[in-house]
Every structure is written in C-alpha cells, then in structure tokens.
Image: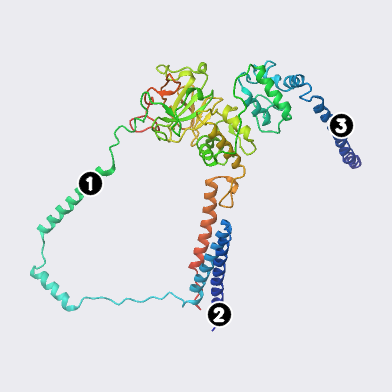
Amino acid sequence: MSTPERRAEVAVGLSFLVTAAAAVGLAVVYWRGGQPQLEGLLLAVAFSGLAYGFVTWGQKLMPPGPVVEERHTLPSPPGEVAELEEDLDRGVVGRRTFIVRALTIAGGALGVAALFPIRSLGPRPGNALTTTPWRAGMRLVTDDGTPVLAADVPLDGLVTVFPEGHAGSADGQAVLVRVRPEQLHPAPGRETWSPEGLLVYSKVCTHAGCPVGLYQADDHTLLCPCHQSAFDVLDRARPVFGPAAVALPQLPIRLDGDGYVRAQGDFSAPVGPAFWSRR
Amino acid sequence: MSRSWTRRRWAAFTLGPVIVASAGVWFVPLSRAAVAQTPPQATPRAGVVRTWLADCAVCHGSDGRGSDRAPSLAGAGAALVDYELSSGRMPLPPTASSTTKTRRHQAAYPPAQQRALVAYVVGLTGGGGEAIPTVDLRGADLAAGGEQFRLQCAACHAWAGDGGALLHREAPDLHDATPVQIAEAVRTGPGTMPAFGQAALDEAQLNGVVAYVRYLDHPTDRGGQPLWHLGPMAEGAVAVILGLGLLILVTVWIGEREPTP
C-alpha cells in the first residue's frame, strides 16, 4: 500500500474516532446535568469529524473520475419503419376530429369546475376595510379585557385600548391619552369627542400599518417606530413628520355614569394605510 | 529657550502633585464639615430651605411655581420629585442651559436630605400628585412583567431596555434604574415619557414590569453569546456572515478533488 493512501486512511479513521469521542463526551455532559454551549460544541465536533472523514474518504481513497459510460444508439428495426410508412400511405392513421372535440370539451369543463373553489376562499370581505369592531356604547378595555376607568388615566397618561369583547383586535386597537383640557382646541364637529381631555386615536399607522405606540407626552406627539411618522395629538392627530400623509382616525368617546370610557361609534375614518377609494 | 522650557516642565512635575494633594487635604475635611453642619435631624427645616434656595429655586422659582427656565412643580407629587433627585437628573449642573438634557447621575444629596427636600417641595407647592410607590418584588410575575414590558415599554426603551431614539428626543437605558425609580417613572411619566396609571398597569403588573426591568440588567442569555443585546438584526448579520461564509468554504472543500496522478 502506498504511503499517501495509508496516510489518508489513518486520517479518516482518526476523524471517525474523534466523532466517537465527542459523542461519548456529549452523553456524559448530558448525564451530568447538561450545559447548552458545551453540548452544542461537542455535537459540532462529532459532526465535523464525520464530515471530514467522509469527504477525505471520497477525495483521497475512491478511484479518480470522472467516469463516463457512453450510451449506444437506439434505432428502430428496419422492418418496423417500413410498416409504419406503409400504414401512413394506406391512411390507417388519420385525423380523429370527434375525439379532439370531445377532449376540448373535457378540458374546458375541468377548467370551469376549477373556478368554483373560489367560493371556498372564505367569507366575502364586505366593508371590513372601512369598519372596525367599535360600536356606539362599547366600553374601552385594556389588552386583558379590563374596562378603562377615566379616573385611572393620569394627566399625560397613555393606555392601549380595545373594543369591549374584542381585546387584541388588530383594526380596533387604539391609544387613549389624557391632555390638559385647556390645551385642546377640538376641530369643528369633534367638540364632544374628548371629555376631560381624554383622546382616543387609532393605533394603526396610516403609512404602513405599524402600531403607533410611542408617545412623547411633553410635546403631545404620537410617534410610529417603523418610519418615524409623527402625529400631533392636540390637532386631530395630523401628521407633522415622516412619510404618513393621513391623520390617525379619532374615536369619539364619552364617559358613562360609573366613570367608564365608552365609544360614541366607530372611528372618524377607515383605519390603517390608505387604499384605493381613499387618498 | 530650551532651558526655560525644561525648568517650567520641572516646575509643573513637582508643583502639580503638591497643589493637587494640598487641595485634596483642604477639600476633604471641608466637605465632611459641610455635611456634618447640616444634619437633617438637627435643623431639617433650615437645611432643606437652604438647599431649595441654593439648588432649585434658581430655575423653579422660590415658590416652586416655575419660571421661563423651568416648569412649575405644582402637583408634581412626591414620586416625580423623588425620581428626579434620586436619579441625579436634578439638580442640573451650574453650567446647564435651557437646552440641557437631563441625564442620570450620582444623586446629589444623601438619602435623609433628599427625603426632606422631597417633603419640602411637595408641601411648598400645595401637595397633590403621585406618592412614592411601594414596590414588592417578592411575588412579582416575571413572565407577565415581560409581556407588559414588550407591550408598553419596549417601543421606546427597546426590547433589552437599552433605550432608543425618538423624535428630537431619546428614551434612556434602564439598566441603572432602581426598582423604586422604575415604578416612579412608570406612574408619573417624567419628561417626555407618558404616565402609566392604574388603567394601563395595576399594582401587580407594575411589580412584574419592575422585576422584568431589573432582570434585563443581567438576563440569562440562553444562546451563550449575547452579542451586546443589539437585537435580531445583529444576530442575523452574524448568522449570515459567519455561518454562510463557513458553509461556502466547506462546500468548496467538498467539491475539491485530488488531481489524477
């Protein structure tokens, strides 16, 4: 046996033994209580040993290639060729118009039938883009479903709220903030929407739909973490910075006799990014 | 020229340490004396009024109703005043201007003096505001606290509590905050931060959040290498550059063949 081949054989054998040793080590470490990093390292050593062994085996000990087996030609026997030519001459193989038409009908029917499962894609979207779960009289609740008491929201306070019974709702999520009532100059038509300086705006950014969860209380700015769109809470959540072009929809609210915050209806506009019928 | 330079340098080398040392000798007993002269229990009222007038009234006004340099402290409450003083954000250094950002420093006053000052400021401005919250971490639910942290805090302070950029502002990192300071900040919303009242976090949830923020200072990094807690982007970059690079090298090695002899 030549020396390089012998060397390669020893290297392959040794790397497999390394794998065996690492596997034993892995079992021991696991048995003694485990240590994730050490276990990972031993597993990596075990597989590396296998990999080194296999590749070296293939590269150094297998016969060198590439080996190509030429394929022989596959002609039809001369007799068959002559028979086919004879059949064509006699018109045995002809056009089958009836069969072709029937096949067209079959294909067409299958294609039409394949359109019917469109019905199974789910309920029709309807006006889901323009409405949210908010209804008049619904209480505002937190993410765990607790109704929000107005007295529990301090000045400059921030609470993420949902429609009662829809905690976690993606399009119904909103932010409730409290500002000084004297700082607030509600837009015409929105005078009754912000009792005691409490304001609720949709939490879904009108730019790309991220949660507008950052509130700078000292300058009354809601900030979107994705693209830094900023909205002025005191002025209809008008965009004042960043790519958003549309104000956050406002949720009209009122306080009930027990001090809970309730919605007067749905948002002032469809929530989220603009779509085709909206600017 | 060179001789006078050498002489001056010698003078600096010899005299410098002497001056520094003598200043230290003078300064240490003086500062000790200053603390000893105003023990809070002996003359609390006089001491705290002097501190108020010397360090706070310059900007907040002698009646605490604010000036064009600083906001009114009316209704600030014990929690907010204690937060600003204990985290060293107040008083501002004498060099501060109206644009100086408040940052965490060593607290300026010893605890007793700080307590007296908090009580004095709250009394001066007619009370009100949030009392210093009590934090109980013994029964705190760390997992639920983490949930609330990611819901309500992580947007600004980042997922590992390292802080982050806002619009012309920044959210500070939370690693040096004490449990009481965290609770005070949550309840009162100092500076840019909004306040989180009972509606946003009840007492149990607040305890959980405080426990989680403290946990973030020494998290158990299951993966071994935390990569400075830079987040999923950093981890992804390491995976792509190191992992894929290594895979490419291995692929090249596997495809290699010994030249046929």
- Residue B214, picture quadrant: top right
Residue shown at 36% from the left, 33% from the top: A275
Where disc 3 sits, the SS reads helix
**Mark 3 belongs to chain:** B
Type of amino acid at the residue the image marks with label 2: Arg
| Front one among B219 and B168 | B219
| Whether residue B100 can be seen here | no
The CA span between labels 3 and 1 is 94 Å
Residue shown at 59% from the left, 33% from the top: B170
Callout 1: few (<14), some (14-19), or many (20+) C-alpha neighbours within 10 Å?
few
Residue shown at 49% from the left, 67% from the top: B254
Q: Are marks 2 and 3 on the same chain?
A: no
Q: Nearer the viewer, mark 3 or mark 1?
A: 3
Callout 3: few (<14), some (14-19), or many (20+) C-alpha neighbours within 10 Å?
few
Residue holding disc 2? A6
- Which numbered disc covers residue B26? 3
Residue holding disc 1? A115
